[in-house]
Amino acid sequence: MKIARWYLALLPAMFLLPSTARADHKQALLSGKILTMSVPGKGIWPGRAMAIVDAKAKDVYKLLTGVASYKSFVPRIVDSKKVNNDVFWLKGKFPWPIKHATVKVKVKQGKKGGAYVMVWKMVSGTFKKYEGAAWIQPFGNRCILTYQMLMVPKIIAPEALMMKGLRNAVLEVVQAVRKRVKKKIASSTATAPAA
């Protein structure tokens, strides 16, 4: 499996912070917070969210790589389906100035070191650019999810507004993953046979 090297290069950058910043981030993550940021780049910067999810890394990876099921839990996705092995079609409903959008994405997935990695890039659609990545790292019986997305519309919109929207979007996706995992755990516990 080939994953865009520049996406993988971003992962260590999250951890190349001064020790005081790492301590603050560690405490924030351990307390259940979702950290969000805009990743510096050219033009509109990608949004990135990082959080601890109360599920095993392989379960979160399976959830995120099931792109055809996004319509059932990912905010703003109103329809999703598999086109072929690694291409998916998504339809979204967004706030102004985008409103409605459709996109076909090619998804690459695999494992790099101890982390599960998923990378997607737009093949065609109503955006100028749509791409992102998710890294899922084991953390005991839980995992650390880092989710990054860049969505550039074909319309003109203030960059600051778009970057804020991207930070909110990645935050909402991580919240949705946490909620979906919690729901799956609750339903599997309810259906488990009594000891």
Image: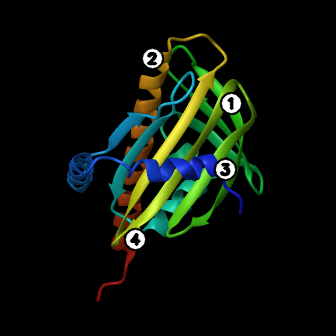
User: What is the C-alpha distance between the residues marked 2 and 4?
Assistant: 40 Å
- Whole-percent x, y for residue 123 in the image: 76, 38
Residue identifier under label 4? 188
Q: CA distance from mark 3 to mark 2?
A: 28 Å
- Which residue is denoted by mark 2 in the rendering? 161
CB of mark 3 within 8 Å of CB of mark 4?
A: no
Q: CA distance from mark 2 to mark 1?
A: 21 Å
Q: Secondary structure at mark 3?
A: loop
Residue that mark 1 sits on: 102
Query: Sequence-wise, which precedes: disc 3 or disc 4?
Result: 3
Residue 96 is situated, as x and y percent measured from the top left of the image, at 51, 15
How far apart, in angstroms, are the residues tagged by discs 3 and 4?
A: 36 Å
Q: Residue at x 47, y 59 (%)?
A: 136
Question: Foreground mark, 1 or 3?
Answer: 3
Rounded to the nearest angstrom, the CA distance separating label 1 from label 4 is 34 Å
- Which residue was labeled with disc 3? 4
Question: Which of these two is toward me, 88 or 39?
Answer: 39
Labels 1 and 4: the sequence-earlier one: 1
Q: Verify CB contact (< 8 Å) between mark 1 and mark 3.
A: no
Mark 1 or mark 3: whose residue is earlier in sequence: 3
96 up-or-down from 178: above or below: above
Of all residues, the one furthest to the bottom in this rendering is 195
Q: Amino acid at mark 4?
A: Ser
Q: Nearer the viewer, mark 3 or mark 4?
A: 3
Estimate how packed mark 1 is, as few (under 14), some (14 to 19) or many (20 or more) residues with alpha carbons within 10 Å.
some
Give how far apart the Cα atoms at labels 1 and 3 are. 23 Å
Image quarter in which the C terminus is found: bottom left
